[in-house]
Image: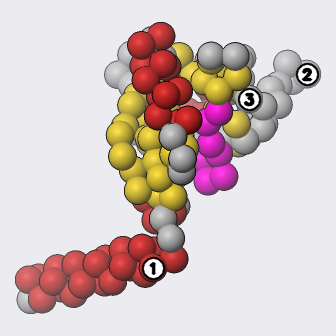
Amino acid sequence: MNGPIKIKNRKASFEYFLIERLVAGIQLNGTEIKSIREGKANLTDSYCAFVQQELFVKSLHIAEYSMGTYNNHEPKRDRKLLLSKRELKKLATKVKDKGFTIIPVQLFINERGLAKLEIALAKGKHTYDKRESLKQKDSQREIDRSQSY
């Protein structure tokens, strides 16, 4: 392996206020872990939803493994997230509140070689909130430039 695999959802912090973060295991089939190790996954349009008291990540794109045969996986299938019952119950009660959703923020491989997904309880931003975050980012960039000279 070339280095640590960390695939981030860069749009998440721009589109949402991230309230609370959790790290969950993800249930993968066959060649999916090999594609993740190659860095061929995309979190951009993915989200999490409850199906019968279980949390699934939906529309997470993991590209087909290039060396896979007929056993290759489906790229955008729903994948089960592995959390404790207490964490699932806590998230389920918060999602029922108006405006909250669960989004994946980062997909990574831990030190034991297992794929983990960092998820966040999030609330959507309005347009004026997005403009404010852009202003803060620009001002921080200007401060960093002035300090580097």
Q: Earlier in the sequence, mark 2 or mark 1?
A: 2
User: Which picture quadrant has residue 96?
Assistant: top right
User: Disc 1 designates what residue?
Assistant: 128
| Residue drawn at (40%, 28%) of the image | 23
The residue that mark 3 highlights is 78
Q: Earlier in the sequence, mark 1 or mark 3?
A: 3
* Viewer-side label of 1, 3: 1
CA gap between label 3 and label 2 equals 20 Å
Of badges 2 and 1, the one in the foreground is: 1
Q: Which residues are magenta?
A: 43-49
Image quarter of the C terminus? bottom left
**Tag 2 near tag 1, CB within 8 Å:** no
Q: Which mark is residue 17?
A: none
**Classed neighbour count for the residue bearing mark 3: other residues with Cα under 10 Å, few (<14), some (14–19), many (≥20):** some
* Residue, disc 2: 70
Q: CA distance from mark 1 to mark 3?
A: 33 Å
Q: Residue at 85% across / 19% down in the picture?
A: 71
Amino acid marked by disc 1? Tyr
Question: Could you say where residue 21 lies in the image, as x and y percent from the top left?
Answer: 37, 37
Res 71 visible: yes
Kindly report which numbered mark, 3 or 2, lies closer to the viewer in this rendering.
3
Instruction: Name the secondary structure under disc 2.
Output: loop
Tags 3 and 2 in contact by the CB under 8 Å rule?
A: no
